[in-house]
Amino acid sequence: MALRLRFGGLTIVRASDTSGAVSVDGGNYNVYRNLFDNGSSHSVSVADTQFTGDNRTRFRFASWSDLGARTHAITGSLSGGTLTAALDRDFKLIATAGAGGTIASNPVVDLAGEFMAEGSSVQLTATADSGRFFGCWVGDTTSTNTVVTLPMARPFTVVATFATTLGMSSGAARPDGVMGATYADTLRVTGGTGMFRDYVGEMKQEGLQLPDAARPLQVAPGGLLQSDRLHANRLGMAWMGFCLQDEVRQLLPAARAAALPVASFEQFVNAAGAESEVADLRAAAQKR
């Protein structure tokens, strides 16, 4: 039995993104590794354009690290080495408008599916039709802002949702809601987006500011929560009450909603007994 031992360094042929393929001596590889005989001849190649399996990323050949042509010959060496095909990447953008609205882009692109160069960006603007309103963006990005800017560092598929105005009705004349009175009422809700706001999640994030009359007050993440980080403390209850005013008005008859006064944040603070917490935040803000 004869054994042949080969010594030397590995020759590695690959693309700058290993999701792309290279060809060595007619075979396709994501990363090619082998020991070449000294002086042996081999061919390397890479496709001018490639796509990932999900067709959301496109690769375009830019150059080989040895400055050779897209298809060229190389000479094997016992010392080995690495040969890399630099690929430029484009990412597909798909933006769909749900029923009741439209989407515009800047720059203008084909929102049904267009590849955009890595490092570029696109601004999408959602506009609701008459009698509808914008709900939110869903998909590879989520936002309740009508305008979003997408940095094309990855593929994006997004949908703009629209809905009719939230309405509430009852089968009979609704009681006036006198405190202490007993009555029954069947309420029917139509329209709306079905979206909800995660107040506890917002309290855990950085950058939350309280609408204090003197100046916005910065709150540390979790500063409006109790120690279990699941329930609001007194200051958190004041902030939620202030934020919920508009939502509550949508649940009331129009005439009654219009008659309700708009309470200030300070009034909610006093109602929750959180005056000392606000005083501490104001003192900390003055030291900055």
Image (cartoon, helix red, strand yellow):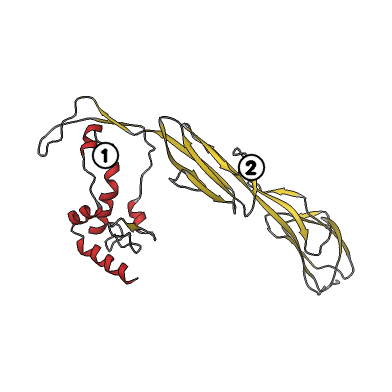
Label 1 is placed on what type of residue?
A: Arg
Q: Residue at x 23, y 25 (%)?
A: 171
Q: Is residue 118 shown left or right of residue 42?
A: left
Neighbour tally class for label 1: few under 14, some 14-19, many 20 plus, Cα within 10 Å: some
Secondary structure beneath label 2: strand
Query: What amino acid type should be assigned to the residue bearing mark 2?
Result: Glu
Which tag, 2 or 1, sits closer to the chain's start? 2
> Does residue 280 appear left or right of residue 63 in this picture?
left
Q: Position of residue 57 (x, y in %)?
A: 65, 49
Q: Going 28% across and 46% down the picture, which residue do you hit? A: 244
Depth check, front residue: 126 or 37: 126
Label 2, residues with CA under 10 Å away: few <14, some 14-19, many ≥20: some
At numbered mark 1, what does the secondary structure look like: helix, strand or loop? helix
Instruction: Give the labeled residue for mark 1.
Output: 249
Please give the residue where the numbered disc 2 appears in the rendered image. 114
- Outermost residue to the front: 214
Quadrant where the image shows the N terminus = bottom right
Q: Decide which of 12, 59 is in the foreground and name it.
A: 59
